[in-house]
Image (spheres, helix red, strand yellow):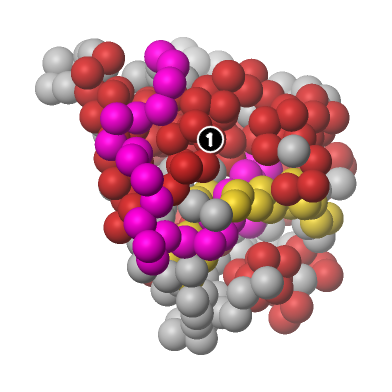
Amino acid sequence: MSGTSPAAGPAAPNAPTRLILHAGFHKTGTTSIQAQLAKSPPAGADYLDWGDSPNHSHGFLFAFCGRDCPRYSGPDGSAPDARRAEMRDDLARAVRAARQPVLIVSGEEFSNAGYEAALREFKAVVAPLVARIEVKAYIRPPVGMVCSQFQQLLKHGIRPAFPGTVRYRRRIAALDRVFGREAVAFRVYDPARLPDGDVIADFCSFAGLEPSGAAGPLRANAAMSREMTAILYTAAQAPDDAWRFDVAVRAGAGILGRLRDFGTA
């Protein structure tokens, strides 16, 4: 797949002057940012209405990376090229439909260095429709990132091994090559240093925007307590002939959500 979408066309007179691409990274409050800004965008900004999820990673993976996605594949689970082209056209139409001077796009997979070619194709679709693209991303200290990844695996019913290295250099270099170093900015993500613990307010400040104030901060995919992490990890050690850990976690998702804050931080 190459070239721009046929639906792109010239930018409209009221086209956004800034497209802010929030490129994650994983485990840096991204889910909360997506959920809150999709629900209540900052003043003077629109949140891209593309696909059926505030996480634009899904549409990006399907339309540009050749990845199958149950959200967008056909009834039989297939993902023909025609449907992928339609999703790229939908992206162009969604950008052109924006009415505010700033348009926000957000997805962790935009920071995946393995998708650099797909990122160039994404840029080819949206760049003609906006005045400029700015990439914003958080970087989390490696120890915090590894601990958060460990919890994430447990929450999804996966027995975690020790997570691998956080490959920041490759991810940053790929974004720099595609968008230009001057267009890419990073901020350290440290939950303890967020203003009033609010990652939404921090992101808006980072992007030069004003929070809408329409709703308070929304916690999504929040961390578990140490005790809850220990309970899940202990449960994960049981052999499969005793019980299926992944099935048990999915079946007990509601209970786990209520017990997330059990114990200490």
Does residue 8 appear to the left or right of 45 in the view shown? left
Determine which quarter of the picture holds residue 188: bottom right
Q: Is residue 205 magenta?
A: no
Residue 90 location (% of width, % of height): 28, 40
Residue 10 location (% of width, % of height): 37, 45
Q: Secondary structure at mark 1?
A: helix
From the viewer's side, name the closer residue of 133 and 157: 133
Residue where numbered disc 1 is placed: 123
Residue 81 location (% of width, % of height): 27, 14
What residue lies at 33% left-to-right and 40% top-to-bottom? 9
Residue 16 location (% of width, % of height): 47, 61
Direction bottom: furthest residue: 213
Quadrant housing the C terminus: bottom right
Q: Residues within 10 Å of mark 1 (few under 14, many from 20)?
A: some
Q: Is residue 214 above or below residue 23?
A: below
What residue lies at 62% left-to-right and 44% top-to-bottom? 23
- Which region is colored magenta? 1-29
Does residue 104 appear to the left or right of 170 in the view shown? left
* Amino acid type at mark 1: Lys
Q: Main secondary structure of the magenta part?
A: loop
From the viewer's side, name the closer residue of 258 and 210: 210
What residue lies at 44% left-to-right and 16% top-to-bottom? 2
Does residue 243 appear to the left or right of 139 in the view shown? left
Direction left: furthest residue: 75
From the viewer's side, name the closer residue of 135 and 145: 135
